[in-house]
Structure formats: structure tokens, C-alpha cells
Image (cartoon, rainbow, N blue to C red):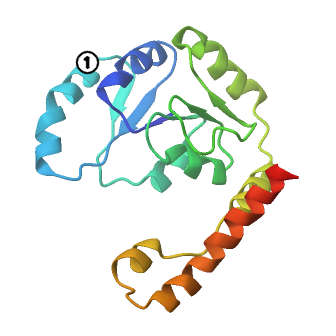
Amino acid sequence: FWVGGVTFSSNCVIAVLSMIIFLYGQDSFRSKEKLNEIVGHYKELKKIPNVKLLNPSITSFDILPKAKLVLAITSTVGWEALFLGRPVITFGDQFYNSIPMVKKCVQIDRLPYIVKDQLENFNYNEKELLAYIQGIFDDAAALDLPYVWEREHNEEKKEALLQTLADLLMKKINMYTK
């Protein structure tokens, strides 16, 4: 089992789950200060039975293919797991929570039941995932917004670059005004 985005607030989740399964967790460190800040947190996590912390050099793609279930707290590991056909439980507001095969845990006392359900009844649906991705593309506009705002000084070019976004917005407005 893989837990991505391990944070201080996740101790409760980890403690509950570690009673019934082996957990492997990892966090990426962007700075030495962040590492120093949470060393004590990881020392506490290591005391919990069945919890194993992975070296940050191990990527999610190294471990996800072996995972039976993926828990995503504040990371994209759940999104990555879906592409590998793994069941996913989220705890935060992830952009992919609306995919029916993803289960969000909003009450910690329901977590054991959600875990059981995902392990016993998960049905990977590639068509569902592809339809979701297609929906993202259908509702997207190709636009390098930082470039338009910060670097492009020619107003006519700015207008041309913003046209795809304007067209998408008008399409959405028209959907709701009919």
C-alpha cells in the first residue's frame, strides 16, 4: 500500500491503517529546511507498526506497480495510480475525485470500510478514465498565460493568443444561458 504526500495531519490515517496493512510512505523534499522541519515527524511515523518510509530517490513509478491500493493525501500519486489501474482513496480535494472508481474518505471512521470496498470491489475502467481525460481536453484552451501577461507586449498578438480562451469561455456561458 502506498501513501503519497505524508504530512503531519495524516498521522491519524496512518495509525488506523497500519493496524491492518503494511504502509509505505514517501515525501519529496524541496529544501533542506523542509527536511529538517519534519525529521521529528518521520521519527514518530517510524514508531508505528507496519509503516515503512521510502527513500525520496525512489519514484512513485518504482513502487506503484506493486501497490494493491493507493492513498493520496495531498499529492498526484493517486492520479498516477489510476493510469496503472490501481484502486485509489483520496483524503483531500483532488481534481480527479469525480471519477467514480476513486473513493474519497471524508470521515476517518469510514476508512476501514472504504479500504475493504476498494480492495474487494475495485473495477478498473479504462474507458471511464479516458472519457475523463477527454473531458479535460474538451474544456481546455491552449494558452501560455504567463507569457501573454508577462512577456508579450504587442496588444494584437495578446488578443490573438487569448482568443482560444475567450472562445472557450463563450462556449461555457452559452451552455448556461440557453
**Residue 52 percent across, percent down from the top left:** 35, 31
Q: Residues within 10 Å of mark 1 (few under 14, many from 20)?
A: few
Residue 166 in the image, given as x and y percentages of width and height: 64, 71
Tell me how many marks there are. Answer: 1
Front residue of 8/150: it is 150
Which quadrant of the figure has residue 10?
top left
Q: Is 140 drawn above or below residue 177 in the view shown? A: below
In this picture, is 145 found above or below 80? below
* In the depicted structure, whether residue 6 falls above or below residue 162: above
User: Left or right of 130: which side holds 105?
Assistant: left
Q: Is residue 35 left or right of residue 13?
A: left
The answer to whether residue 148 is seen in the rendering is yes
**Residue 12, located in which quarter of the rendered image?**
top left
Query: Seen in the image, is 27 located left or right of residue 36?
Result: right
The answer to whether 98 appears left or right of 25 in the picture is right
**Of residues 177 and 45, the one drawn nearer to the viewer in this rendering:** 177
Q: Secondary structure at mark 1?
A: loop
Which residue is located at x 82 percent, y 51 percent?
177
Task: Identify which residue is drawn at 46% across, 87% down.
Answer: 155
Vertical comparison of 158 with 90: above or below = below
From this viewpoint, is residue 137 visible? no
**Disc 1 marks which residue?**
47
The residue at the point 23 percent across, 29 percent down is 42
Q: Position of residue 72 (x, y in %)?
A: 50, 36
Looking at the picture, tell me which residue is in the foreground, 175 or 88.
175
- The residue most toward the right is 178
Q: Amino acid at mark 1?
A: Lys
Q: Give residue 109's position: percent from left, percent from top.
A: 55, 8
